[in-house]
Image: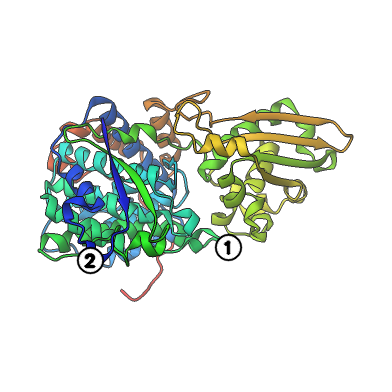
Amino acid sequence: MTVTHHLRVHRSDEHLAREGQLAWHIAEVAADPVEVDADTTDMVINRIIDNAAVAAASLTRAPVSAARQQALDHAVSVGGDGATIFGCALERRTSPEWAAWANGVAVRELDYHDTFLAADYSHPGDNIPPILAVAQHVGADGRALLRGIATGYEIQIDLVRAICLHKHKIDHVAHLGPSAAAGIGTLLDLPVETIYQAVGQALHTTTATRQSRKGEISTWKAHAPAFAGKMAVEAVDRAMRGETSPSPIYEGEDGVIAWMLDGPDASYDVPLPAAGEPKRAILDSYTKEHSAEYQAQAWIDLARKLHGEHPVATDPANVASIVLHTSHHTHYVIGSGANDPQKYDPTASRETLDHSIPYIFAVALQDGGWHHVDSYTPERAGRADTVELWQKITTAEDAEWTRRYHSDDPNEKAFGGRVVITLADGTVIEDEIAVADAHPLGARPFVREDYVRKFRLLAEPVLTPEEIERFLDLAERLPELTADEVRQLSIVAKPGVLAAAPAPKGLF
């Protein structure tokens, strides 16, 4: 059972009591001692494995190396044992906020972990690095970590169901700061008042524009959620010391809704679990089989199907045009409706290319698949026949696909569309796909063995076989892990892997 919280702007002279504020209700959910059920436990384990997989694949990439070096340049905080950093030896720790930062970048860098899309967008797996970092620092056991992660997913997904940030050009990590703070609050068994203050500060410090995902997309895209996780750790620390935060942060007349979202007359209905109700929102999220923006997942699957069925369409000399009829989001964010010339630029950054559905569809159609490294290389993006085909691909918003994208019915919700390929001789090829093959309603829904296979595939180049098995054993025993075992819930790179990665110097 859920309880719907009606959210609106209040003038200061209306004096909205804390107990009526969304941040307070979030804190109440976080403080609820309800246990995590079996289905949610299983999925949390899947996502811990998934995060480690994509982090392993990104260990030597420049943004991850930079964030890791920043973390390594900070000593362990005196108040605990510190937290591990992906790739580093287990005894090489840093303070939890910097571990959240480094690991958050590693998880996010390849745009390859889980997703939830509704009124707004999210990668709820971004909650795991800050919650895990704090768990390691304070000596929490596996059960506490499990409960904290379940809360982080619940709060972020509930906010994403109800409040659209994108239409106001606010980055989606504004829902992540509060959710990570709430998850840490659950982990630490903090009182409602303390979590409430932490949620307020976490939101206040993580609202930023979406320019990080527009035009020439920079390396900050991977750092943005890591920054939100780092701010959540610091917000909890501050709240635990008795300090207060802006209030009411959502509903105030100079607050987030009034000035960053729908304005003084706005209202939202936010669904939250009732007291004693298990936190199951993670079960509504889904991971990626392919390293690309989630709206590209189904299109990659359709393109590889067409590659086998209609090889004629892979040669630009045979193609007059390709139009992807799809949702508003796909058209305007990663499609031609964005009006970003960079989405058609063969020299664009990897971050830009993974937000270009014309590029992704062209490569997947020609190659019959997708690879997290090879599909993004400058050589692949610059191949003459690919560039020629790419320039012939556009997107168009289709009202029905937009409606399905926003549907509240999970059996109807869709993230794909219909492709119309017009060949040079006038032949028309049409096909469509609603959800990715790996989606819970797709052709091959991801289950534990798929998460493990993804982890092995991405980890084998950088982890020893023994390390792969050690991590999987810990992850799959999550609820029963001791505090010492939680501190080992990380991945250690093979000798020489990190030494070969960039080690940039900065201020620290």
99 vs 218, nearest the viewer: 218
| Residue depicted at 32% across the width and 31% down the height | 43
Q: Position of residue 387 (x, y in %)?
A: 74, 51
Identify the image quadrant of the C terminus.
Answer: bottom left
Q: Nearer the viewer, residue 429 or 377?
A: 429
Extreme front residue here? 13
Dot 1: element: loop
**Percent coordinates x, y for residue 443 in the rendering:** 53, 23
From where the camera sits, is residue 96 visible? no
Tell me if 142 is positioned left or right of 465 in this view.
left
Report how many numbered discs are placed on residues in the image.
2
Q: On the image, numbered disc 1 is attached to which residue? A: 216
> Is residue 406 shown left or right of residue 469?
right
Disc 2 marks which residue? Answer: 13
In the rendered image, residue 160, in percent from the top left (x then y), is placed at 39, 45
Q: Residue furthest right?
A: 425
For the residues labelled 2 and 1, the Cα–Cα distance comes to 44 Å
Q: Residue at x 11, y 46 (%)?
A: 189
Judged by depth in the image, the label closer to the viewer, 2 or 1, is 2
In the rendered image, the quadrant that contains the N terminus is top left
Circle 1: residue type:
Glu
Q: Residue at x 13, y 48 (%)?
A: 188
